[in-house]
Image (cartoon, rainbow, N blue to C red):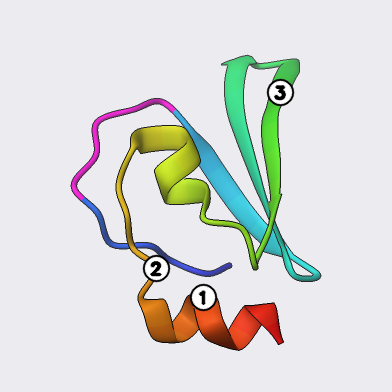
Amino acid sequence: MAMLEYDIQCDYNYIFVGHHYFFYRIKDKDTVLILEMFHEKEDFMRKLFGIVTTSQETIDYWKE
């Protein structure tokens, strides 16, 4: 599992599988809610929390 280091208060958990981040919430002992799925190319930190983490160099790289 990849680890992200941001001091954000939320009840999301995530796993990284096959180039995708899956964000989920544990509702109770029998229920897991899948909230969002993002490809690693997507700026999910901006979409979820409004935090811009992508450099112009990275944006240019993924455009090619």
Q: Give the secondary structure at mark 2.
A: loop
Q: 47 above or below 54?
A: above
Q: What stretch is highlighted in magenta?
A: 7-11
The answer to which image quadrant residue 27 occupies is: top right
Question: From the viewer's perspective, is the residue at label 1 or at label 2 nearer?
Answer: 1
Q: Name the chief secondary structure element in magenta.
A: loop
**Residue 18: x %, y % from top left:** 81, 70
Q: Distance between the residues labelled 3 and 2?
A: 29 Å
In the depicted view, which residue is nearer to us: 45 or 8? 45
Tell me the mark number nearer the camera, choosing from 3 and 1.
1
Q: Name the residue under label 1.
A: 59
Residue occupied by mark 3: 32
Name the spot of residue 23 as percent of width and height, x first.
61, 39
> Of callouts 3 and 1, which one flags the residue occurring earlier in the amino acid sequence?
3
9 is within the stretch colored magenta: yes
Residue placed under numbered mark 2 in the picture: 54
Considering every residue shown, the one lying at the far left of the view is 7
